[in-house]
Structure formats: C-alpha cells, structure tokens
Amino acid sequence: MNEPVATAGPVPGRPEDERLRIGPTFGYGFQHVLTMYGGIIAPPLIVGSAAGLTPAEIGTLVAASLFMGGLATILQTLGIPFFGSQLPLVQGVSFAGVSTMIAIVGGGGGIQSVFGAVIVASAVGLLITPFFAQIIRFFPPVVTGVVITTIGLTLMPVAANWAMGGNAEAPGYGSVSNIGLAGLTFLIVILLSKVGSGTVSRLSILLAIVIGTLVALLTGQADFAGVGEGPIAAFPDFLGFGAPTFQVAAIISMLIVILVTLTETTADIIAVGEIVDTKVDRKRIADGLRADMASSVVSPFFGSFTQSAFAQNVGLVAITGIKSRFVVSAGGAILVVLGLLPVLGRVVAAVPTPVLGGAGVVLFGSVAASGIRTLAKVDYSNSMNLIIVAASISFGMIPIAKPDFYDQFPEWFGVIFHSGISSAALMAILLNILFNHIKVGTPKNPSVFAAGTDRGTSAVEDDDLEDLEDDGVLNKSNRRRPPSSTEATPPTDPAAP
C-alpha cells in the first residue's frame, strides 16, 4: 500500500482535500489504524493495571480509548467551525500523560482522580489555545526533547514489570519462563523490523504481540477464558467508572502534561503541513489544538484520557504519499467501530503481560529515542542548554531510581513530583526561562561543561586508527594540524589555485 491511487474525480485546490475511491480510502485508513494500534492500546493497559482494575475493566478502558480516538480523529480531519485542522492527523491517547496518571493513581486518588485531572487540565488547555502561539517559545526542543525522552525512560519499569509477569504477588513472577517469553517477543520485534517489507517492519510490534500470544497459548501461559464474559458489542458507558474526583495536585501535574501535549500537536500540525505541502497558519494551528483539547475534555466521561496527534502516522503520510484527510477520517471511523466492540478490548487485556513487556521495551524505548532525536536539534555551543538537559533528565529520573524519595513530603507534593515527567518538565521549563530568557547575570563562558562534550574536533580520526593498528603509537607530528579557534588563520592568497 505504498503507491498513490487514482482519485475518483478532480482534485480540489488543497492537496489534503483529495478524494480517493472508497476501497483505497478505507484500505489506507486501515493502514493508519494498524500503524498506531500498539501505541493507542498501551496507555489504558498501563494505567488500568496501575489502578488495580480487573481485566474486564481494562478491556473497557481499551475500547473507550479506541472509540474516543476515532471520534477525535474524525473531528481533527473533517473539522467544524473553530475545531479541527482539516489535516491528515490521527488522534489517540497520548503517551505524555502515562507516568503522571500512574503517579496520581499511586497517590490514592484512583482512576476517578485521573479522569478529573484530565477534564480540568484539558479545559484549561482549551481556553489557552488562542494564546498558545505566544507561549510556545517557552517550549523549544531543549524542553520538549527532555520531556519526551523522560516519558520513554520512566515507562521502562512498566515494561520490566510486565516482562516479569505484571503481578508481584502471583506465582511465577520473575520466572525464567515469563522473562523468556518477553525476550522471545522482543526478538520477534527486532527480526520483523529487519524484514525487507516496509509494511511488516512498521507493524513489527503489533505482529510480535500476536505471535508472542500464540506461543503463550501453546505453552499454557495465556488464559482467554474471560474474553467471552460480557457483551460483544456495546456503546461506551457514560461515567462507567463513577463520577470523576478533583485533586488540586493531580490537576497541576496533568496541566504540565497538557502544555507538553499542545507543543507536540503544534509540531505535528506544522510537520504534516509541510509533508502535504499546504498552508498552515496560526488559525489552523489553533483549530487543531482546540480539537485536541475538546476531545480530551470529553474523553474521561466515556473512560478514556488525553488525546493527541500520533507522530508515527505523520511519518506514514510521508512514506505512502497519500495526503488525503478523508483517508485518515476513514481510519477514525474504523477506530470508532473497534471501540464499539468491548470484546476486542477484553482480548487485548488478556494478552499475557510478559508478551506486552517484550514489546513494551521497544515501544517505550522508541519514545525515548524520539526525544533524543529532538534533543539532537538543540544548539549546545554554549553550556546553558547542556545544563538544562543534564539537570532536567537527572531530576526526572529521581522518582524512577528511588520511588520512595518523596514519601516524607506532603501528599500534594508527592503527587506532582512522583511523576518523572512532571519533575523533568518543570525543571526544564524553569531552567530554560532562567538561562535562555533571563540573560541578566549570565557570563559568556559560564562553565566547563560545553567544552567537555563537543567532540566534533577531537574525535578519533582514521589516521589515529591506522597508527594504533600499525604499531600502537599515535604519530600526529607528521600530520597537518588545523588551526585552533584561538590561532590566527593565515590570509588566503586570492591568486592561489
């Protein structure tokens, strides 16, 4: 499915308004669903497990996430006045809030407190969307890169716990069979990623989960007995988990996540606009952000969480060359249908946790890698950005390395800072303002950090390697040494060849 398909009629003025025939429209739409499926089911699985929900309840969370992701996608792509960018963007539950929601659940608020925090924080996000263009300068790559990297790193304990069995009280937790099944799933992901087919490679995580589950069935490590308990098809219940509760600390913590989500979605709107080669202005960005936040406000009432654009689907638009927003709308319709099948959610919830752990190592690692890629765009020519990255990531890792670090602090403080994402984001935002926006008092060369990390001019050269292989002695005296930045460069003779 990588070649553009002939359209059903004349193409409108904007590339994203192109309409394909009904078959290719839903075919390419289904490809979008497969590309993001592993990502959209992971957050409800993680949060539901942390909240101590039953497999049936986790299945309900999964179904609700599919349903609301589909509606959010349709709103974003088709649009109504003031809501929706009308660009080919797939929406789904954002990974950005997972660690924060786990911290809220761990603070004793339960899943209801998570829902309440998402509602209020998203409502605030909806109110500030017209002005977000003015404050987005406080979220440059040095901030967003730190946050995205931290998201991936803070989820690694979740993957490790899944690989061990998911329940420390259950027999066999941490057994060789559990970790072996996780390792097999991980290996399948790697092998499928290596396969020449681009489609298979992009679906490697989803396919590995399926294959790993089949292996678990053969070895008696999977139990799907509960899948048949409950309706096959049903509309998501309104307030099915009870009325949301509202805790100030949880709301503040989630508001930080919302600011990061707004930044990510802004970047995705700009990126897909460039891929599609269409005009993206401030109004279009604001309309897209409003669709994000409106969907996030409504989602908790039906058992789902914050909604955000999926970056991997932006990449899929670039790979396939299919720019039509109606293709993505068809994908949203497919998600809605899947969300009306709670039996599918129960199937997902019944997947053995070691299988999810093996796939999660790669899935969560890819989130961290995405953050590292963002950090690669940062200018480290002075030490300020380096200190921001170093201090923020380290600060964010404290509650991960030592979960009881803030146990003696007030409960509201712990709810905010037990989340590595909240900790890293707060530190990155404050340090970025202190170092990059408040210039008063900052010396020109404030520390030695920057010089120590710029290895561009001091890297091991090919000649060095040859010397080491020949006689083990570096012989730089016979090589021409480039002038340092403190040495005067001889003037160039214009007449020289």
Image: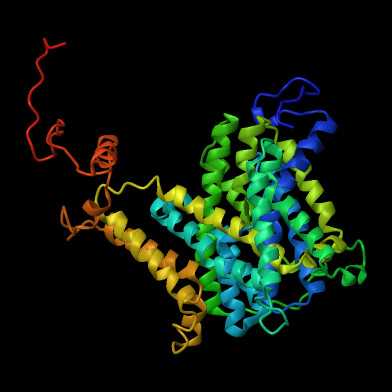
Seen as rendered, the residue at the extreme front is 471
Q: Position of residue 273 (x, y in %)?
A: 57, 35
Q: Position of residue 155 (x, y in %)?
A: 56, 66
Q: Is residue 11 or residue 152 the one in the foreground? A: 152
Residue at 75 percent across and 20 percent down: it is 10
Above or below 130: residue 178: below
Q: Is residue 191 or residue 463 the one in the foreground? A: 463
Above or below 428: residue 242: below
Q: Quadrant of residue 387?
A: bottom left
Which corner quadrant holds the C terminus?
Answer: top left
Color theme of the render: rainbow
Q: Quadrant of residue 328?
A: top right
Q: Please give left or right for residue 385 compared with residue 197 in the image.
A: left
Seen as rendered, the residue at the extreme bottom is 408
Q: Is residue 483 or residue 400 the one in the foreground? A: 483
Can residue 463 be seen at all in this image of the molecule? yes
Can residue 437 be seen at all in this image of the molecule? no
Q: Please give left or right for residue 406 compared with residue 243 in the image.
A: left
Residue at 61 percent across and 66 percent down: it is 159
Q: Please give left or right for residue 236 compared with residue 120 in the image.
A: right
Residue at 54 percent across and 33 percent down: it is 274
Above or below 39: residue 246: below
Which corner quadrant holds the N terminus?
Answer: top right
Figure label count: 0
Q: Position of residue 447 (x, y in %)?
A: 19, 59
